[in-house]
Amino acid sequence: MRRMAPVPTPPAQPEDTTDSYVGLDAETAERQARARGWSTVRALPPGTVITMEFRGGRINFEVDASTVTRCWVG
């Protein structure tokens, strides 16, 4: 009898409000996100083409002229 590997438990997402990052400079936003427990912080320029896979523990920033203009989880 073959056993299947256990289903991995995704990391817990920090309790956070994405709107709180909009308007911050990118460096401050990244420091704040890491301090709040985000395991992956990704900063992207406006219009960047990205895949739509959801990754738990990741927060995304759209950064224009070093200012966060949009933020979302995954």
Image (cartoon, rainbow, N blue to C red):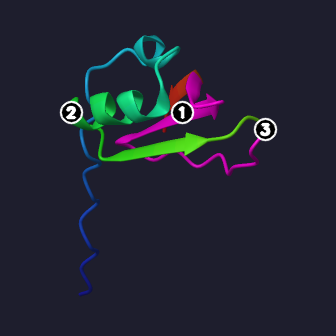
Q: Distance between the residues labelled 3 and 1?
A: 12 Å
Callout 3 crowding tier (Cα within 10 Å): few <14, some 14–19, many ≥20 = few
Residue bearing mark 3:
47
Who is closer to the viewer here, 20 or 12?
Answer: 20
Which quarter of the rendering shows the N terminus? bottom left
Residue bearing mark 1:
61
Query: Which stretch did the figure color magenta?
Result: 47-68
Q: How far apart are marks 3 and 2 (CA)?
A: 27 Å
- For the residue labelled by badge 1, is the local secondary structure a helix, a strand or a loop? strand
Q: Residue 41: where, in percent of width, then height? A: 41, 43
Magenta stretch holds residue 28: no
* Residue 19 vertical position relative to residue 58 in the rendered view, above or below: above
Q: How far apart are marks 2 and 1 (CA)?
A: 16 Å
Q: Report whether 3 appears left or right of 26.
A: left
- Marks 2,1: beta carbons within 8 A: no
Q: Report whether 49 appears left or right of 72.
A: right
Callout 2 crowding tier (Cα within 10 Å): few <14, some 14–19, many ≥20 = few
Mark 1 or mark 3, which is nearer the start of the sequence? 3
- Residue 11's tag is none
Residue bearing mark 2:
35
* Residue 45 vertical position relative to residue 71 in the rendered view, above or below: below
Q: Residue 9: where, in percent of width, then height? A: 25, 51
- Point 41% across, 35% down: residue: 27
- For the residue labelled by badge 2, is the local secondary structure a helix, a strand or a loop? helix
Magenta stretch holds residue 65: yes
